[in-house]
Image (spheres, rainbow, N blue to C red):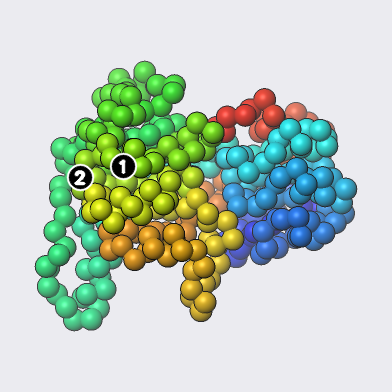
């Protein structure tokens, strides 16, 4: 089957070409995002493969269907960027990768936390310039600190296991508490306001829904401890970025680690070093010394990329053969999956 991969990069091509030896699909890799303007690039392809920042609105899906597309294969777990009702009306099947490597994302969140706390990025820059001073690099022991985890799906559970290994106390918030997790890891499920008030570090691992959009807003920041750390490796729009800037300006937060940003589409996955970032809020965030931003790379491990490619191509195989689609996403799944 002809499969066009939008917003693809060298690492995507390497992983998909390696996995495709066992599948035999005809793959076309495009560096551009899927938008209404780029739909013609998929003309005649029965399937398109999309990522988190591709646009899959009603008009785009209509144009894809008119161009001959019958399958939208998401190479990610979330589907908040897809108009599922429009897809069903057009007869387009939408499949996803429900899980690849939750460890990859959880471990990246921990990497952000450790880097911010012990300021290894600043220390490395100093040492390379011959400056071995330790002034301004004092961190804190994670052992004994309270970690607040919002969302206890696969990734949240992995993050909790790591933090428990550091000797941390963990409080969690999720609309569907996991009794087994609470028992095995000693996790206490608490209301969000309690979590925000008690946690020294807050890590977001929730899906993006209408209920979770701007879950961390000005009110939420006001409830946090002075000096608290915030980590977001889930979805950018969980955090109100303007309110985050205000909280940082007030000196309320000790550290912020972001792998996602609510207006990252069209910014992330590209090189802006020559022109600068044309987003005032993101540019302002990057001026704060206690803020560490990575460009949506938490998933970026060989293990995760291989799992994503294999599951995506398995989904395409099943569609081509007329088999049941075990990873099908329907309009009834209005709430994106636990992550």
Q: Which residue is mark 1?
A: 221
Query: Would you say 150 lies left or right of 275 here?
Result: left
Nearest the viewer among 32 and 315 is 32
Secondary structure state at the residue bearing disc 2: loop
Q: Residue at x 88, y 48 (%)?
A: 66
Q: Is residue 189 visible?
A: yes
Image coords of residue 309 (percent x, y): 62, 49
Q: Residue at x 70, y 39 (%)?
A: 83
Q: Residue at x 63, y 28 (%)?
A: 333
Q: Residue at x 16, y 55 (%)?
A: 139
Residue 72 quadrant: top right
Image coords of residue 334 (percent x, y): 62, 29
Q: Which residue is mark 2?
A: 226
Secondary structure state at the residue bearing disc 1: helix
Q: Residue furthest bottom?
A: 130
Spatial distance from mark 1 to mark 2, Cα to Cα? 9 Å
Q: Are marks 1 and 2 in contact (CB under 8 Å)?
A: no
Q: How many marks?
A: 2
Query: Would you say 169 lies left or right of 272 here?
Result: left
Q: Is residue 257 visible?
A: no
Above or below for 240 versus 219: below
Residue 169 quadrant: top left
Image coords of residue 154 (percent x, y): 45, 34
Image coords of residue 38 (percent x, y): 76, 60
Mark 2 or mark 1, which is nearer the start of the sequence?
1
């Amino acid at each position: 089957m002809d499969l066009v991969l939008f917003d693809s990069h060298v690492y995507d091509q390497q992983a998909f070409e390696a996995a495709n030896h066992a599948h035999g699909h005809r793959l076309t890799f495009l560096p551009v995002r899927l938008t209404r303007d780029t739909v013609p690039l998929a003309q005649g392809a029965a399937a398109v493969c999309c990522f988190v920042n591709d646009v899959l609105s009603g008009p785009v899906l209509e144009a894809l269907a008119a161009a001959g597309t019958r399958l939208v294969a998401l190479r990610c777990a979330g589907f908040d960027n897809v108009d599922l009702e429009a897809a069903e009306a057009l007869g387009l099947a939408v499949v996803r990768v429900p899980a690849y490597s939750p460890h990859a994302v959880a471990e990246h969140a921990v990497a952000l936390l450790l880097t911010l706390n012990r300021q290894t990025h600043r220390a490395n820059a100093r040492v390379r310039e011959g400056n071995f001073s330790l002034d301004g690099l004092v961190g804190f022991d994670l052992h004994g600190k309270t970690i607040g985890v919002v969302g206890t799906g696969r990734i949240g559970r992995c993050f909790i296991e790591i933090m428990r290994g550091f000797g941390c106390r963990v409080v969690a918030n999720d609309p569907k508490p996991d009794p087994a997790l609470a028992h095995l890891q000693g996790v206490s499920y608490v209301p969000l306001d309690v979590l925000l008030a008690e946690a020294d570090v807050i890590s977001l691992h929730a899906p993006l829904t209408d209920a979770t959009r701007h879950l961390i807003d000005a009110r939420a920041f006001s409830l946090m401890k002075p000096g608290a750390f915030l980590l977001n490796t889930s979805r950018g729009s969980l955090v109100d970025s303007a309110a985050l800037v205000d909280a940082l300006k007030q000196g309320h937060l000790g550290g912020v680690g972001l792998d996602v940003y609510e207006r990252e589409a069209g910014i992330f996955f590209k090189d802006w070093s020559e022109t600068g970032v044309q987003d005032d809020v993101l540019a302002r965030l990057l001026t704060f010394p206690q803020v560490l931003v990575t460009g949506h790379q938490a998933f970026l491990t060989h293990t995760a990329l291989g799992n994503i490619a294999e599951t995506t191509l398995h989904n395409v195989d099943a569609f081509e053969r007329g088999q049941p689609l075990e990873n099908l996403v329907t309009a009834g799944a209005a709430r994106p999956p636990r992550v």
